[in-house]
């Protein structure tokens, strides 16, 4: 995701190999000596331009010196393989894109600290180049319709099609993110002192370096049930990992704790985890041995087609034994409040680490895309749970809920999102509401901050107590403010009628505020803020609608009894 098309393309796995090929021009075989690249440490008070953009209070960052790694002796064989394309092919690739792909130097991903109520950090990518380029030529080539905006006095450009935002700090650097996140990054003080300051300076001397302020990182739900003996590991306040390339690759990790007692407990937990990991090697070892050692003595040679399996078994046993040796004598030391682990790879594995570092650098621009895909999968699951709750409500009460819980005069008081709480395992929260009072009564408004996680769309920054999950309300739509509908009220078919969508402006989750539908009136833009329309159907399925869907087709899918034929763009 970036201003340049080749960087946009790098979000797609198939293009990563092409970008790696382009890097041949940065370090072609005749330019590389047998010595590892010298990575200069930052001079006092100086940092490379990309690292200078990392705030001292950042949540995390990852930095890869792609060009330096690509020049290293360990990846020489891969350079030579790509070089076989020939100088004409490489020159053609450079001539067809701006900036030239072969001039990629370093790639950095930065995550800002999360604010209260925010479920995802703002993440931006920074790509630096070895040769200056003209930002205007980049904009003209790839962002002709980009909108120039300012944030924190810095100019940036938005690309509506992909909801991208791009900033050019200088003529060798591109900063990119989503249209909401990049403006936040631009106003965040880059040189703010914080726990990340020392790590930023360390990164300047490494070919690969990553750091995370673990204390500020939310604990993933799957780790909440970690056995007690391993939980001391989770008390780390700061963590770093780095890669040094010399004759052999050395991977070093460091976990920093609040006290020496915490570090001691974590070391004990780490060694216990290593013991369990060694036990975990037994099963794959047995599988490899099964492929290599027959139960009965062989009376004749094995079929030739068994050779690849047998060779793979020997390689697997060798790798498992190397892992077992490392785990048996875990190279961990305690230095005051910190645990340090350093592993030097054998020569045969150094090339793997070198190529992995290059791959990591090329994948960093895709981090926002990966997060987006994971977030969309979670949002899809949220909508499936909402649809299931609607069906369970129907089974219990003989109809789907009305769009609102009304008072005795029919005035909407609370949203359907409150009505289905007992069906999303939130009965205790449901019982706290006064159902005869409006959503913003003195009592009920205190419950707004308690919005269930299922109503938070993870694809974008979450506003406290607000949701993007809404239904259509109207005489032709799937819901009515007062009346409940049964399955028989959907003659167009439950698989052809939209139950709920995720999009448009967020609303307070308890408020009866949804999308008023009239087939004769225009619809709001539901592609914002996520770039697409995620819809749950009345049959319980969830689908991503065609971003180019016509208004006629969308309206036909919203109506429950219009009898329309849904268009081919559905």
Image (cartoon, grey):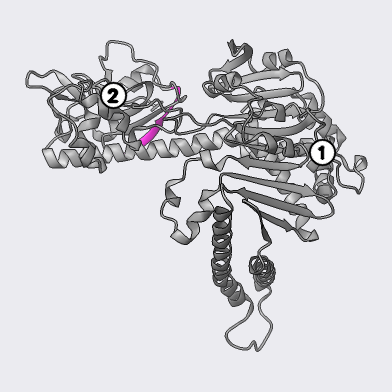
* Residue 49 appears left or right of 415: right
**Nearer to us in this view, 464 or 409:** 464
**Badge 1 is on which residue?**
24
Establish if 210 lies above or below 552: below
Question: Which region of the structure is painted magenta?
Answer: 540-548
On-image quarter of the C terminus: top left
**Badge 2 is on which residue?**
558
- For the point 71% across and 52% down, which residue is it? 251
How many numbered marks does the figure carry?
2
N-terminal of the pair, mark 1 or mark 2, is 1
- For the point 18% across and 39% down, which residue is it? 393
- Say whether residue 246 is magenta: no
* Residue 345 appears left or right of 265: right
Whether residue 391 appears in this view of the structure is no
Establish if 249 lies above or below 144: below
Q: Position of residue 423 (x, y in %)?
A: 22, 41
User: Closer to the camera: disc 1 or disc 2?
Assistant: 1
* Residue 324 appears left or right of 518: right
- Say whether residue 547 is magenta: yes
Q: Position of residue 79 (x, y in %)?
A: 82, 44
* Residue 178 appears left or right of 527: right
- For the point 46% across and 45% down, which residue is it? 220
- For the point 79% across and 43% down, which residue is it? 69
Q: Position of residue 308 (x, y in %)?
A: 68, 68
Whether residue 65 appears in this view of the structure is yes
């Amino acid at each position: 995701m970036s201003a340049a098309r080749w960087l946009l393309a790098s979000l797609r796995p198939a293009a990563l190999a092409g970008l790696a090929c382009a890097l041949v021009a940065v370090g072609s075989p005749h330019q590389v000596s047998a010595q590892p690249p010298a990575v200069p440490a930052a001079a006092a008070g100086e940092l490379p331009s990309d690292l200078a953009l990392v705030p001292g209070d950042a949540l995390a960052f990852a930095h890869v010196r792609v060009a330096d790694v690509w020049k290293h002796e360990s990846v020489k064989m891969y350079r030579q393989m790509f070089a076989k394309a020939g100088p004409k092919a490489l020159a053609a690739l450079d001539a067809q894109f701006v900036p030239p792909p072969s001039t990629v130097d370093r790639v950095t991903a930065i995550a800002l600290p999360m604010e209260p109520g925010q479920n995802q950090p703002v993440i931006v990518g920074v790509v630096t180049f070895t040769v200056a380029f003209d930002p205007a030529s980049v904009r003209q080539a790839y962002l002709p319709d980009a909108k120039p905006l300012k944030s924190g006095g810095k100019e940036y450009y938005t690309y509506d099609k992909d909801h991208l935002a791009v900033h050019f700090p200088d003529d060798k650097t591109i900063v990119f993110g989503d249209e909401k996140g990049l403006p936040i990054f631009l106003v965040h003080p880059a040189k703010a002192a914080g726990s990340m300051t020392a790590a930023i300076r360390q990164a300047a001397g490494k070919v690969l370096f990553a750091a995370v302020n673990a204390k500020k990182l939310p604990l993933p739900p799957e780790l909440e049930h970690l056995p007690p003996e391993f939980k001391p590991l989770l008390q780390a306040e700061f963590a770093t990992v780095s890669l040094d390339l010399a004759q052999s690759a050395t991977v070093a990790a460091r976990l920093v704790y609040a006290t020496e007692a915490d570090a001691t407990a974590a070391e004990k937990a780490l060694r216990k985890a290593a013991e369990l990991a060694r036990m975990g090697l037994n099963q794959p070892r047995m599988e490899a041995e099964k492929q290599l050692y027959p139960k009965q003595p062989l009376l004749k040679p094995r079929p030739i087609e068994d050779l690849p399996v047998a060779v793979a078994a020997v390689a697997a046993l060798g790798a498992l034994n190397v892992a077992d040796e490392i785990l048996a004598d875990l190279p961990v030391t305690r230095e005051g409040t910190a645990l340090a682990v350093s592993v030097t790879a054998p020569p045969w594995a150094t090339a793997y680490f070198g190529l992995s570092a290059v791959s990591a650098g090329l994948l960093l621009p895709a981090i926002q895309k990966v997060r987006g895909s994971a977030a969309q999968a979670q949002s899809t699951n949220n909508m499936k749970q909402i649809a299931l709750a609607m069906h369970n409500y129907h089974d219990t009460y003989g109809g789907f809920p009305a769009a609102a819980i009304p008072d005795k005069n029919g005035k909407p008081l609370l949203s359907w999102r409150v009505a289905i709480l007992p069906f999303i395992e939130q009965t205790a929260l449901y019982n706290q509401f006064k159902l005869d009072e409006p959503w913003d009564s003195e009592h009920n408004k205190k419950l707004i901050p308690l919005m269930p996680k299922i109503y938070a769309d993870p694809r974008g920054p979450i506003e406290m107590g607000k949701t993007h999950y809404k239904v259509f309300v109207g005489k032709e739509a799937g819901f009515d403010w007062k009346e409940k509908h049964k399955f028989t009220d959907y003659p167009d078919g439950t698989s052809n009628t939209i139950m709920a969508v995720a999009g448009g402006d967020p609303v307070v989750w308890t408020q009866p505020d949804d999308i008023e539908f009239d087939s004769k009136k225009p619809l709001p833009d539901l592609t914002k803020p996520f770039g697409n329309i995620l819809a749950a159907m009345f049959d319980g399925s969830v689908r991503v609608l065609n971003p180019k869907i016509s208004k006629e087709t969308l309206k036909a899918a919203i109506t429950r009894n219009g009898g329309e034929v849904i268009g081919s763009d559905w």
